[in-house]
Amino acid sequence: MRSTRYNGFFEEYNILHFMGGRKKGLALFDSETDGEDFQTIQREMWRFHLVLDEGGVKRFLMFLPLGLCGGLWFLLLFNIVLYFFLEDITNEGLIDLFSGRFLFNLVISLFFLNIYPYFLRMLGHKYAYFDRVTQTVSFSFDVGSDELDEFGNQCFPWLDIEAEIFEQIGDMGVPRFFVRLVHKERDKYPKVSLRMDVVGIQNSAMYCHLRWELIIRHMDNTKPLPDIPIYELDRSKDDLTREFDKQNNRPKLFWAGFSLGEQSRLKRLYEEDAADFNFTYGPEREEIVKPWLKWKPDLTQEQVNKKQSFIKVALIQVLTGLP
């Protein structure tokens, strides 16, 4: 049985956003960029912990709209500000000059929102997922295993898969840390190699350790799921977790009362504390299993109505090109 040391688990999740149905904004069509199996794995977070290939081509293409649209809108804004310093241009001339570029940028953003996802769907992700129920790790690509899971993907027993945290020297001599999934019998299964996506600053190995500890904790089916926002809507689907919540009178939808800003603040507290922790030899810390006794949501936060929410989502979509 694998164990964790830091035991500080936290991942933000916009619970109210998904409870009310995903707000599409200006994305008029289905924006899912993968098949039904991938969507199921992505949706059933209580059971599957999904990791994407950090170096995958599709991952780059998924964020391509952000760079292009963001660059176009920034360039437009910069030119508008620049023209304000010209004495010989009127407001009417400014509008005539930039209205065409504004419409061009808008068309590009709408293309990325509504057409581009269908091109991405044809590519497919390179990914792996950890199954809490079957205690297996499955891969979307050929890894040399004869065992298949319910989706037809090759898989291995959970304890056969290990994580390697390695360092690469990047530009300007700055070190970058990554975590790679490998089989414990590397010579026998050399195809098992996936560099996991890790959210955080790459020049710190801390984020790699935090991600791997969360995976270990997710796969420990002798305990209820960690009490963090990403599991809030699915806690009742896991038998052990449901029973734990019932016995301890856990408030229903506890994390739904926390805004994303509050969740980000709590995550930063964990990360600041973890920065000085020795994940290899440090003493095992106690996990917070009843967060409702430690934290309370800010009930004074302003509620956003549907109109404000639509405008906010639409504005972000236009500026980033991401649905």
Image (spheres, rainbow, N blue to C red):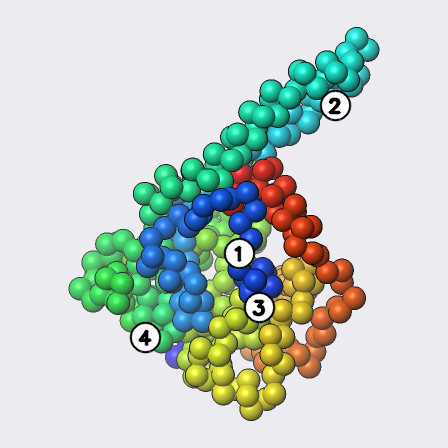
Percent position of residue 92, x then y: 75, 16
- Whether 184 is drawn above or below 64: the answer is below
- Gap between marks 4 and 3 measured at Cα: 23 Å
* Residue that protrudes farthest toward the left in the picture: 146
Residue at the spot 53% in from the left edge and 60% down from the top edge: 21
Percent position of residue 183, x then y: 30, 62
Between circles 4 and 2, the one closer to the viewer is 2
Closer to the chain start, of discs 2 and 1, is 1
Between circles 3 and 1, the one closer to the viewer is 1
Mark 2 residue type: Val
Where residue 81 is drawn, which disc sits there? 2
Tell me the SS state at disc 1.
loop
Tell me the SS state at disc 3.
helix
Mark 4 vs 3: CB contact within 8 A: no
Closer to the chain start, of discs 1 and 4, is 1
Residue at the spot 53% in from the left edge and 49% down from the top edge: 24
Mark 1 residue type: Arg
Residue at the spot 79% in from the left edge and 8% down from the top edge: 88
The residue that disc 3 covers is: 229
- Whether 162 is drawn above or below 1: the answer is above
Mark 3 vs 2: CB contact within 8 A: no
- Gap between marks 2 and 1 measured at Cα: 36 Å
In the picture, residue 249 is in which quadrant?
A: bottom right
Closer to the chain start, of discs 4 and 2, is 2
Closer to the chain start, of discs 3 and 2, is 2
- Gap between marks 4 and 2 measured at Cα: 58 Å
